[in-house]
Amino acid sequence: MANRWQSFRIALAVLALSLTPGGAQADNPIVQTRFTADPAPLVHDGVVYLYTGHDEDGATSFDMRDWRLYSSTDMVNWTDRGSPASLKTFPWAQQDNGAWAPQVIARDGKFYFYAPVRVAGRPDTVIAVAVADKPEGPFRDPIGKPLIPARNGAIDPTVAIDDDGQAYLYWGNPDIWYVKLNRDMTSTTGPIVKVDKPIDYQEGPWFYKRGPHYYMAYASTCCPEGIGYAMADKPTGPWVPKGPIMDPNAASTGNHPGIIDYKSHSYLFGFHYELNFALTPIHHERRSITLREFRYNPDGTIPRLPWWDDRGVEQIAPVDPYHWVEAETIAWTSRIGRDRDRPYRWAPGVTTDQGEDGRVHVTRIADRSFIKVGGVDFGRGAASFAASVARVRGRPTITLHLDRVDGPEVGTLAPKNDDSPAWRTETAAVTGATGVHDLFLVFNGGGEALFDFDRWQFRPAPGS
Ligand code: FUB
């Protein structure tokens, strides 16, 4: 009888798993392998490119030397695309700090990157411009000097192109300024204008047009910072304050909005300090980008949203595992653990890095670490798993679990011991992977750097 009851429970569990609906949920913050700040999302060719500032791991106050890029097509899994630009892009700038909030815009087949930097030997900031042929760069400085000279608070550039083709660059803390850009996007025309700012404006403007309305979202109040916004009928204002989008939270000194529409959904990006507080009770400038979905009101106003939670947003479409997926495509990694009593704690994890061959990959994979990929659609079944690996030390394994880190195991890959840096593909058989599931790639083996991992894919079962 007991055996029949057990069999029944197993059958129920299998049924429940096979019925798991699609639409995985994201995790906040959306990047755990680095501290990221100042989100600047760009929708281009069906992809969300998220340009970010980067707080160094050991930062106490602002310690920022390069910018990072992540991309997603489902808003749950984010692929590390490396560093598109750094202070080295602007050799005339102070090189050891100051890579603050950027924004990128596409025009005429090129990508234009605007960011504040400091001029070596001077205390104030300027705004620099760089250009690239691809979203992931490399960006290069076409003018060799600041685009916007040092002025009180020349930080946090935001850029948009109006329907008539005129581009506007706004920026500023504690005041807000704009200038028109020429069609080349690397020179300005007309005067630099200071506008009447909304009363709670602090910094971090995010300027865009949606339908007939112009929007200016910004970090409001200080400190802590919430997110406020204003609307206008013209790109140059006057800006009518519309109140908070998000109230400040005592646990988070800063905030910084980035807003996009993507595949008929609207998203607000910002940041919090929760991963910093996983490491230390002391406030350091080590921030983590967060995400929330919202719906505009019928009159175009933005609803008031609650503070960031740890659940993120719903997945737009599941991952197709039957094409190569970059290993650095991550919904969540074990670098940060979660438990009931303490939302975040440090745990064995993985790192992402760009190799000499230019490939971004997963590295420094620790024993008992994992990568979660949200919402993978195995369809009618997978037969095998292939992984591109290098520098394999010891006898590591990748075990594939569904839905939870200790969920049903569908296969294990044991790459051959070989310390060579050359990428090679290894495969393992898979059974029991059907339908849509979160996929956990669980890494085991002795040590803190088991192997390097570039990409993976499943092969479908014959006839499926
Ligand atoms: O990341 C450095 C500065 O902190 C940004 O430029 C501001 O918006 C604030 O987020």
Image (cartoon, rainbow, N blue to C red):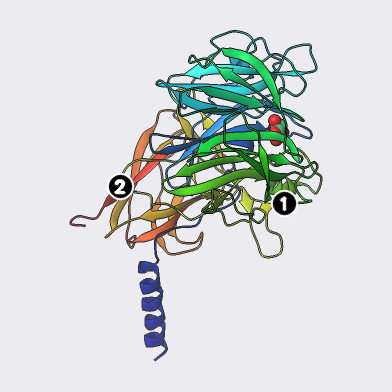
390 in relation to 93, above or below: below
In the image, ligand 1 is in what quadrant? top right
Left or right? Give the position of 210 relative to 287. Answer: left
Indicate the position of residue 431 as horizontal and vertical percent values.
32, 60
Q: Secondary structure at mark 1?
A: loop
State how far apart marks 2 and 1 are (Cα). Answer: 43 Å
**Mark closer to the observer (2, 1):** 1
In the current view of this chain or complex, which residue is farthest to the bottom?
A: 1
Indicate the position of residue 438 as horizontal and vertical percent values.
44, 57
Give the residue displayed 37% in from the left and 59% down from the top: 436
Q: Which mark sits nearer the N-terminus, 2 or 1?
A: 1
Q: Amino acid at mark 2?
A: Tyr
- Asked if the residue at label 2 sits under 8 Å from ligand 1, the reply is no
Circle 2/circle 1 CB separation < 8 Å: no
Left or right? Give the position of 80 relative to 156. Answer: left
Left or right? Give the position of 386 relative to 48. Answer: left
- From the viewer's side, name the closer residue of 83 and 355: 83
127 in relation to 284, above or below: above
Image quadrant occupied by the N terminus: bottom left
Q: Amino acid at mark 1?
A: Asp
For label 2, the crowd category at 10 Å Cα-Cα, with few meaning under 14, some 14 to 19 and many 20 or more, is: some
- Asked if the residue at label 1 sits under 8 Å from ligand 1, the reply is no
Q: Quadrant of residue 422?
A: top left
Q: Which mark is residue 247?
A: 1
- From the viewer's side, name the closer residue of 259 and 393: 259
Q: Secondary structure at mark 2?
A: loop
Give the residue displayed 57% in from the left and 24% down from the top: 168
Give the residue displayed 46% in from the left and 23% down from the top: 165
In the current view of this chain or complex, which residue is farthest to the top?
A: 144
Residue 81 visible here: yes
Counting the numbered discs, the total is: 2
Residue indicated by mark 2: 322
